[in-house]
Amino acid sequence: MKKIIVAFFLAASAVASLSYQAWAHHAFSAEFDANAPVTLRGKVTRVEWINPHAWIHLAAVQEDGETEAWMVEGGTPNTLLRAGINKNSLPIGSEIVVRGYQSKDRACAPACKANGRDLAFEDGRKVFMGSSGTGAPKDGSDPRAR
């Protein structure tokens, strides 16, 4: 009986630690800053259509005309598909505008990171990128404008 109780508590501890890791990974506020909104305009350089989050890489044009490499985290591929985006929607070289929130780590090595809130295509279409995790702004607005 003692072995069963010990095994139960070990299993419960393992499950509890896994659920904490899953929550920490999916918590917007653990990695991104809701008070640091960004608007990125540039050309798509790469798309990673992977779980748990798709990544859109772009060469964002800065105010001085120089480009800066950015990695923008989106929702899961399934979430993006339901929003009308697929890997082929973002061909290399296509111009996009992404609104989102910058990473708390501002090192920008090898690229700056952001969590995408919405994406606008050249033709004017806009889609939600799925950043509604724990701590993400609920309405998608710029918190400085509230």
Image (cartoon, rainbow, N blue to C red):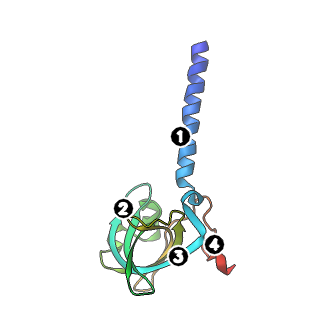
Of labels 3 and 2, the one closer to you: 3
CA gap, disc 1 to disc 3? Answer: 32 Å
Other-residue count near label 2 (Cα within 10 Å), few / some / many at <14 / 14–19 / ≥20: some
Three-letter code for the amino acid on which mark 4 is drawn:
Asp
Residue 143 to residue 17: above or below:
below
Other-residue count near label 3 (Cα within 10 Å), few / some / many at <14 / 14–19 / ≥20: some
- Which residue carries the number 2 mark? 49
Secondary structure under the numbered disc 1 in the rendered image: helix
Q: Quadrant of the C terminus?
A: bottom right
Can the viewer see residue 96 in this picture?
A: no
Residue at horizontal 65 percent and vertical 78 percent from the top: 144
Kindly indicate the quadrant of the structure image that contains residue 21.
Answer: top right
Task: Determine whether label 1 and label 4 are within 8 Å by CB.
Answer: no
Residue 27 to residue 121: above or below:
above
Three-letter code for the amino acid on which mark 1 is drawn:
Leu
Q: Earlier in the sequence, mark 4 or mark 2?
A: 2
Secondary structure under the numbered disc 2 in the rendered image: loop
Residue 99 image position (x, y, % from top left):
51, 76
| Extreme residue in the top direction | 1
CA gap, disc 1 to disc 4? Answer: 30 Å
Task: Determine whether label 1 and label 2 are within 8 Å by CB.
Answer: no
- Which residue carries the number 1 mark? 18
Residue 79 image position (x, y, % from top left):
47, 62
How many tags in the picture? 4
- Which residue carries the number 3 mark? 38
